[in-house]
Image (cartoon, helix red, strand yellow):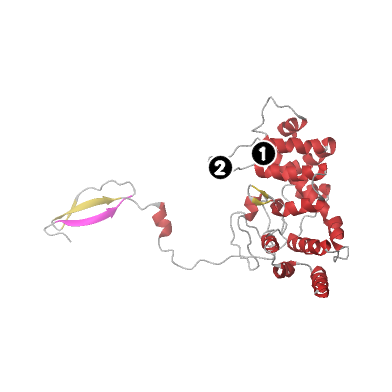
Amino acid sequence: MPTGDSVIIYVQTTTGGTVPEYTIVGAPLIAVPMPAPSLKQVLEEDWDEEEEDNSCDECSYDPCECSQQCGEHEACSCGWCESSGCPVCCGCCGCGYYDDGEGYSEACERWGLPERVNLVPLAADFYLLYELSLDNMDDGRFQAWLDDNLSLFVNYTDMVVGGELRHASGILDDDEQTPLTKAIKSTFRRSERGEAWLAWYDFRKEHGKQALEWATNIFNTFTAGKSGDYGYGGPKWASISDALLMLEAGTISPVAFVDMCWGLEHNGGCYFSKLPWQAEVQEVLDANLRGRTDTVLEYATEDVRKLYETEVESSV
C-alpha cells in the first residue's frame, strides 16, 4: 500500500481505458488501467484437473477431429485417417469401422479389391515362403501365395495411381495434349477419390500400358514446396506408377514387384493407406532385412509358421 492519502486501486478493463476519479473518505481513488487477459491466459487458467483418457483400448490412439464412433471403441482415431485421405474410418486400429463416404465400395468392387485386408501376416508369409522356395522346401506354397495375392498388389497400385492423378489438373501444361491430360482436366477434375478410381479404371481399359507411361510423366512434373516436400504427385508417386509399368512391360518379375510394393511410400507415408487396411508391416520388413526370422515368424499365419519350423528342423 503506498504511503500518504492516496489509495491505489487496480481496475481491470476490457478496453484499456480509465474510469473517472472518485473521492472516498477524503482520499482520491486512482484508477490504474490494466490490459485485459489474453485468450491464451484465460484458456490456461485453472485447468489443472486431469483430462479424461479417451484413447482407444486396442490401438492407444487418441481421438482427434476425424474420430468417429465405430461401435467397438468409444473413440479411436489419430490423424492417420485424415493424413491418408480417409475421412471416416478406424482402419488404423483394425476395429473394422469404415464409413464409405466417397464411393470406395463401388471402386473396390470394380477393381476386385477387398475393402479390408490385414497385410501384416501376408508380408510375413511372403518372405518366409520365399526363403523356403529358394531351397525347394516350400511345398509349392510360395507360388500358390503369388497366385492368390498378386492381383491384390497389382490392382491396388493401379487404382491409387488414378486417385492421385486428380490433383494434377492445376499443374498441367496447356500445350501438352494427351488423352490423359484431357481426361484429368475434364473427368478427373474436382472428383472425389472414389470417383477418380472409377474413372481411371475405364481409362486404363481403353489405353492400357500407355496410360501408366503418361501417369508417370505427369507425376514427375509436380514441383516441391518451399520445404522441399511434395504435397501431391512427385517422385514417390512416379515410382509407384513406374513399378506397375515395369511389371506390365516384363522388366521385373511378379516376385520383385510385390517385394517393391512392401517398401513403396507416397508423400504421406506407406502407400497402402488409401484404404482402411491394416498395413503396419514395417516391423516385419525390418526383421526380414536384419535376418531376424524369429520376429517374422511371430507375425506369420499358423500354417506357414508350422511349415517353416518343420522344414528348417528337418534340414538341420
Whether the magenta-drawn stretch holds residue 155 is answered as no
Please provide percent x and percent y for residue 170. 64, 33
Which residue in the protein does label 2 denote?
A: 228
Return the residue nearer the eye: 160 or 10.
160
Please provide percent x and percent y for residue 177. 73, 27
Q: Which mark is residue 167?
A: 1
Residue shown at the point (88%, 62%) measured from the top left: 140
Residue shown at the point (68%, 56%) measured from the top left: 89
Return the residue nearer the eye: 42 or 227.
227
Furthest residue in direction top, as rendered: 175
Disc 2, SS: loop
Please provide percent x and percent y for residue 274. 70, 50
Residue shown at the point (66%, 65%) measured from the top left: 73
In the depicted structure, whether residue 183 falls above or below residue 1: above
Whether the magenta-drawn stretch holds residue 8 is answered as yes
- Residue 252 in view: yes
Task: State the CA–CA distance, disc 2 to disc 1.
Answer: 18 Å
Disc 2 residue type? Gly
Furthest residue in direction left, as rendered: 4
Disc 1, SS: helix
Disc 1 residue type? His
Return the residue nearer the eye: 121 or 188.
121
In the depicted structure, whether residue 75 falls above or below residue 159: below
Return the residue nearer the eye: 140 or 269.
140
In the depicted structure, whether residue 283 falls above or below residue 208: below
Please provide percent x and percent y for residue 249. 82, 41
Residue 136, picture quadrant: bottom right
Please state the extent of the stretch shown in magenta in the rendering. 6-13
